[in-house]
Image (cartoon, rainbow, N blue to C red):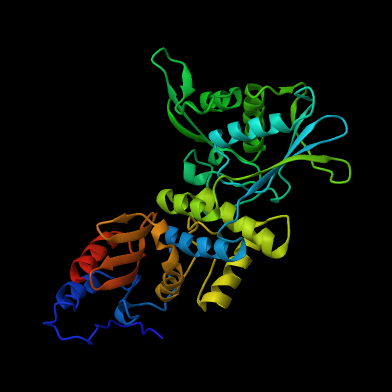
Amino acid sequence: MIAAALFFWTAAPAADAAAPDRVRLARAAALVGPRDALVLAGPDGSILLAKHTETPRIPASTLKLLTALAGFEILGESYRFPTDFFLDPEGNLKIKGYGDPMLVSEAVAAIASEVAAALPGKKTVGDLVLDDAFFAQPLTIPGVSDSFEPYDAPNGALCVNFNTVFFKTAPDGRLVSAEPQTPLLPLAIQKIQSAGMTRGRIVLADGNREGLRYAGYLFAYFLKKAGVTVQGRVRFGRVEPDRDRRLHRHRSAFALTAVVERLMTHSNNFTANQILIAAGAKRYGPPGTLEKGVRALAAFAEEKLGIRGLKLTEGSGISRQNRITAQGLLAVLDSFVPYRHLIVEENRIRTKTGTLAGIQTRAGYIEAASGLYRFVILINTRGRSADRILQEISAALP
């Protein structure tokens, strides 16, 4: 048990070149306020610094480390999100999504070619029918607002490009895509014009199934480029296994480890909660819901990692209602060691950062000559700096 006071490692004398600099560690500890938390563990597991480690704090995006671990446990490291394509007796093409967060334009273009190759005879279908029933709707994520910021993108079983559209204004005043691989579709242009924006990313809302409709139009665009004619309309519907024939199953080009690597690099809230909801559906059965995902995450944290004092409302860290102790996050880091290469390294430090208004959190590893150190810094006090603490800690380690 880690006590909630401050400790220094005393296994080596102060003059030992392999021992941490106690003065710098003291400086780091002094920067931790009563509403914050800090823990630093040495290569042998000994605790070098510990302050308020058993009091739950807001983790912000450091929570993604726990979500990733639960995803590996429940879905599997090599799991690849599928997307299914069916033909019904009337010749309509149905697309059923299972939450793939990596359905970007390049993937949709490749899938369209696969579907074209699988279609028998004339490359013609009736309606394009979209089935997102694998995730329940609506999916309301605590902490997500109605802004146009990418971190507020809604979740769903069939979404493309992270439910966002990246655009700019051309010199002649036209709205154009800011990504050469992505067309700027009429639905997106209409939304951009309504918002009065001239460049940036716009988020597709879930209130009127905007994200699902956009996914359908993007698939229709690339199916046409692949030689498939959609004679009917894009609409919502359901796959009927007793009468519909599965034409093709696409599995993502990205295994879950690759998805998590991108998650750690870009701290994408959408991706984190796609993993969470898919894990909940795997553990407790479809449809995937936020409640099932949170329940699966909490059960994993308690049963596999022995974490107590946990309060979870979603899996990305965007919610200010989430709570975890520094001791709990240290247990996450202990289990994440084999995957630490998925976190970007800079100046020997691998850090998962978290930021909300008045909140700065850091959790990760320092790969020093004397071994691998693990640190958790949970700053829940406005105006205090997690980075200053991390700088002092890093400078203290030989």
Image quadrant of residue 35?
Answer: bottom left
Horizontal side of 274 relative to 83 (left or right) equals left
Query: Toward the viewer: 107 or 150?
Result: 107
| Total residue callouts | 0
Give left or right: position of 341 versus 24: right
Q: Residue furthest top?
A: 172
Residue that extends furthest to the left in the rendered view of this protein: 15
Residue appearing at x 70%, y 30% in the figure = 117
In the shown orientation, is residue 145 left or right of residue 377?
Answer: right
Indicate the quadrant containing the C terminus: top left, top right, bottom left or bottom right: bottom left
Whether residue 70 is visible to the viewer of this picture, yes or no, is yes
Give the vertical position of 119 relative to 36 (above or below). above
- The foreground one among 295 and 285 is 285
Q: Quadrant of residue 342?
A: bottom left
Please tell me which residue is depicted at 33% across the width and 66% down the height of the picture. 365
Question: Is residue 258 placed above or below 73 in the rendered structure?
Answer: above
Q: Is residue 232 above or below residue 33?
A: above
- Can residue 313 be spotted in the picture? no
Residue in the image at 58% along x and 71% along y: 300
Residue 169, percent from left and from top: 42, 21
Which image quarter holds the N terminus?
Answer: bottom left
Residue 51: horizontal and vertical position, in percent?
A: 32, 77
Residue nearer the viewer, 248 or 15: 248
The picture places residue 384, in percent across and down from the top left corner, at 27, 62
The spot of residue 208 in percent (x, y) is 67, 37
- Asked if residue 52 is positioned above or below residue 244 in the image, the reply reads below
Residue at figure coordinates x 39%, y 59% from the top left? 341
